[in-house]
């Protein structure tokens, strides 16, 4: 499969740009938003954003905001850097969350093993049951 899960195929710099010539303004606007979001996601890849895709984002930013070309380029570069930072932060958080989940599972397994061993000793009669755990006999007050 040559495409990614976001619908962006390697080498496909056109994306939804064919929809931009349509007569419906809202379809063209959603296509532009989808294009810019897809391109920001590809910023975190090893290759980064292709030069023609970056130029497309600069033109799109300049058209929407009315900024000059250098200001639009700076804004696109900031957006790409911000997207890379957010994706990196999400990856780090996912690694920490996975580690903590594994540690919690390991701690739960150790606690259940300890409780099973203690319960087995009580069942076999090696040790008497603790007063709080022996529900069958009444507690004696001293």
Image: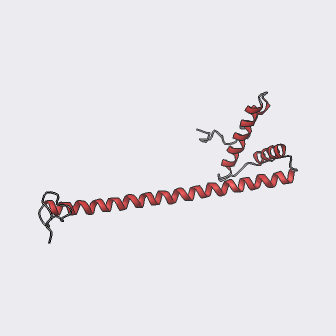
Frontmost residue, 95 versus 107: 107
Q: Is residue 139 above or below residue 74?
A: below
Residue 3 location (% of width, % of height): 62, 39
Q: Residue furthest front?
A: 141
Frontmost residue, 5 versus 111: 111
Q: Is residue 93 above or below residue 29?
A: below
* Residue drawn where x is 37% and y is 60% of the image: 106
- Taking the image as shown, residue 132 lies to the left or right of residue 99, namely left
Residue 98 location (% of width, % of height): 47, 57
Q: Quadrant of residue 128?
A: bottom left
Q: Residue furthest right?
A: 68
Frontmost residue, 15 versus 131: 131
Q: Which image quarter is the N terminus in? A: top right
How many callouts does the rendering have?
0
* Residue drawn where x is 70% and y is 46% of the image: 39
- Taking the image as shown, residue 136 lies to the left or right of residue 51, namely left
């Amino acid at each position: 499969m040559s495409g990614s899960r976001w619908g962006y195929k390697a080498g496909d710099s056109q994306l939804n740009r064919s929809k931009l010539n349509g007569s419906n303004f809202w379809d063209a606007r959603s296509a532009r938003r989808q294009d810019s979001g897809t391109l920001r996601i590809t910023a975190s890849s090893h290759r980064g954003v292709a030069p023609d895709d970056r130029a497309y984002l600069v033109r799109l930013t300049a058209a929407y905001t009315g900024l000059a070309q250098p200001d639009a380029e700076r804004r696109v570069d900031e957006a790409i850097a911000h997207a890379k930072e957010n994706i990196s932060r999400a990856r780090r958080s996912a690694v920490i969350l996975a580690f903590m989940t594994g540690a919690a599972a390991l701690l739960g397994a150790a606690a259940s093993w300890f409780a099973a061993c203690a319960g087995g000793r009580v069942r076999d009669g090696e040790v008497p049951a603790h007063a709080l755990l022996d529900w069958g006999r009444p507690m004696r007050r001293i």
